Image (cartoon, helix red, strand yellow):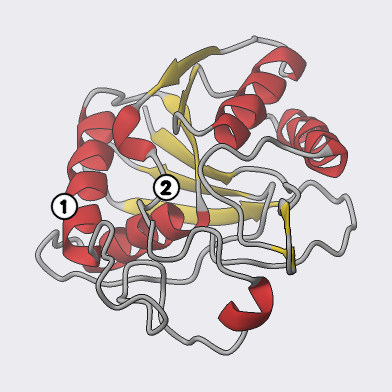
Amino acid sequence: MNSSMLLIRHGQVDSPMGPTGPRMYGSKQPLNKIGEQQMKKLGESLEAQGVAPTLIYTSPFPRAVQSAQILSKDLPNHPLVIIRENLRGGSSPQWDGRPISELANVKEDIFSTNPYQPDIQGETLPEAYARVTQEYQKLLDSNLESTVAIVTHGEIVSIIRHYEKTGDKNKIGLDQPIGKAEALLIQRNNEGTILKQQLITSEFQSNPVEMKK
């Protein structure tokens, strides 16, 4: 029997307002109304394509937990939601609270040193890569011959996709993320070889402000 993994990015959130305008959101931001609708639509898309995860693992961040709970409620089999700490987004105190206008021209990812605050460093990419790939492999190994889902963040999906491409946890890097409220279905045979990758979208159109996580 083949196994399948669904990599799902949480739905849209609002950026909080600060004295200088919108700021980059942090780990506690919930879904906004559009994000809730996106996840409902994604659940409908999964059901229409016959994709029914038996478990949903989620990052502990509120926007991910909410996304997982919406999917669980709307899918016919109501899969159990399990919070996994190691699926959390990157820890980036060097980025949190910076005005979006400042961040717009910064090319680095959230694991890099912030040019505005070089003395503050959160989790580095090697640290995050080790955390995420170890957790991901553990979930793969414990769910053979099953379909399970992971609800997490853009940078974590980027790490997992890079790990899937290289098959080597020592080749650290980032691949392309998927969009908010999108799911990447990865199907494997009994030997663990990837048979197919399919992007499943919510088909709900919106124009969110894209930020780094």
- Residue at figure coordinates x 85%, y 51% from the top left: 203
Residue at the extreme front: 19
Residue 4 image position (x, y, % from top left): 44, 36
- Residue at figure coordinates x 40%, y 53% from the top left: 156
The amino acid marked with disc number 2 is: Gly
Residue 164 image position (x, y, % from top left): 30, 59
The quarter in which the N terminus is drawn is: top left
From the viewer's perspective, is residue 47 above or below residue 204? above
Q: Secondary structure at mark 2?
A: loop
Task: Write down the quadrant of residue 88 in the picture.
Answer: top left
- For marks 2 and 1, give the CA distance: 13 Å
- Residue at figure coordinates x 40%, y 67% from the top left: 110
> Between 93 and 209, which is closer to the camera in this rendering?
93
Residue 52's tag is none
Residue 89's tag is 2
Label 2 vs 1, first from the N-terminus: 2
For disc 2, the neighbor class at 10 Å (few under 14, some 14 to 19, many from 20) is many
Relative horizontal placement of residue 160, taking residue 29 as reference (left or right): left
Residue 89 image position (x, y, % from top left): 42, 47
Task: Write down the quadrant of residue 187 in the picture.
Answer: top left
- Residue at figure coordinates x 72%, y 47% from the top left: 13
Residue at the extreme right: 205
Q: Nearer the viewer, mark 2 or mark 1?
A: 2
Residue 130's tag is 1
Task: Write down the quadrant of residue 60 in the picture.
Answer: top left
